[in-house]
Amino acid sequence: MIDAHVHLIGNGSAGSGCWLRHRGAQRVLETFMLREIGLTSADLQRNFDELYVERLRTMIRGAGLSHTLLLAQENVYSDRGEIVPDRAAFYVPNSWVLELARRYPEFVPAVSIHPARPDALEELERCLEGGAAVMKCLPNCQNIDPARPHYRKFWERMAEAGLPLLAHTGGERVLPVLRPDLANPRMLTTPLELGVTVIAAHCGSAAGLGTADFFPEWRSMIECYPRLFGDTSAWSFPGKFRHLAQLLEPAVCARLVHGSDFPVPVQPVWAWLARCLSWSDYRRIRKLGNPLARDLALKQALGFPDEVFTRIENIWRRPAVAVGAPLG
């Protein structure tokens, strides 16, 4: 089984180039996420790069996962290709994700490239050469309008290379949102029409009460675009479960891949309150200390079929390491 939506986070302590800049209410979320990993705020002042990786590797083994798709995190850029200061909450360079994937076979690299950056195509080539399996972006948080003509060559090169796009869709609670209009899955039309295989993270669903919900748009789009998929990441948030029956339809399940959105907390209580989870399953899942295992158990209890947990292997660009290789 493979988790296709796992975030890498760091503070640069290992020379990774990572940084974290959560502010205000986001610091509260940061505390919850650190608790999910089994670390504290004090660990942010230590060798957090290596601590995070080791904790994650331990959790992967404990959850019975063979691999995780490990996500880099790009900076925010203006349409002119200039870094927008103080708008990104964290940064993880592609070089660090690619290095960890070379070092540990359980990690499969998902790079992150803003197509507005002046060297976007050069960075794409470097990442392809380094073994990138997926390209990840958050259009609403990173100011990426996929329909811009300037980005056409970038999408065409991704399509030619067989590199899928994993793009955030729907509501967002964790990161600052610059372009709320880019949360609609319909903004992914241009890459799809240029031949890019696209995974709409969260299937356009809300990220809790009061956030944008574009699940109906994603649901209608999969009937028109055979290269469009969705993932089940962060599916434990309230407000998502009204779509569960549709999500479990065989034709829709055939377009889903499993993802946790780690280290976003997994709370099975919302599924139980929505009457999608039995009391005994809720109690069993709540007791699981490993968040990757807890998320996996929740998705299985909700009724997602086995194929959802392995489908990403048939979608991503073949990684540099063999899937199923022994864990290091």
Image (cartoon, helix red, strand yellow):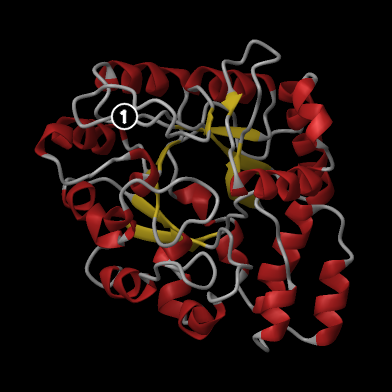
Image location of residue 144, percent across then percent down = 28, 41
Q: Nearer the viewer, residue 48 or 316?
A: 48
Q: Residue at x 83, y 38 (%)?
A: 39
Tell me: residue 197, above or below residue 236: above
Q: Find the residue positioned furthest to the left.
A: 149
Q: Find the residue positioned furthest to the bottom.
A: 275
74 relative position to 198: left or right: right
239 relative position to 222: left or right: right
On the image, which quarter does residue 213 sit in?
Answer: bottom left
On the image, which quarter does residue 180 sit in?
Answer: bottom left
Image location of residue 163, percent across then percent down = 35, 37
Tell me: residue 56, above or below residue 297: above
Q: Can residue 255 be seen in this snapshot?
A: no
160 relative position to 63: left or right: left
Q: Can residue 2 be seen in this snapshot?
A: yes
Q: Nearer the viewer, residue 86 or 194?
A: 86
Residue under label 1: 77
Q: Which kind of residue does numbered mark 1 sit on?
A: Tyr
Q: Residue at x 47, y 71 (%)?
A: 210
Image location of residue 203, percent across then percent down = 42, 64
Q: Find the residue positioned furthest to the top.
A: 15
Q: Residue at x 60, y 59 (%)?
A: 309
On the image, which quarter does residue 283 sit in?
Answer: bottom right
* Mark 1: few/some/many CA within 10 Å (<14, 14-19, 20+): many
- Count of residue discs: 1
Q: In what quadrant of the picture does the C terminus appear?
A: top right
Q: Residue at x 69, y 34 (%)?
A: 325
Tell me: residue 264, above or below residue 163: below
Tell me: residue 311, above or below residue 53: below
Disc 1, SS: loop
Image location of residue 107, percent across then percent down = 63, 33
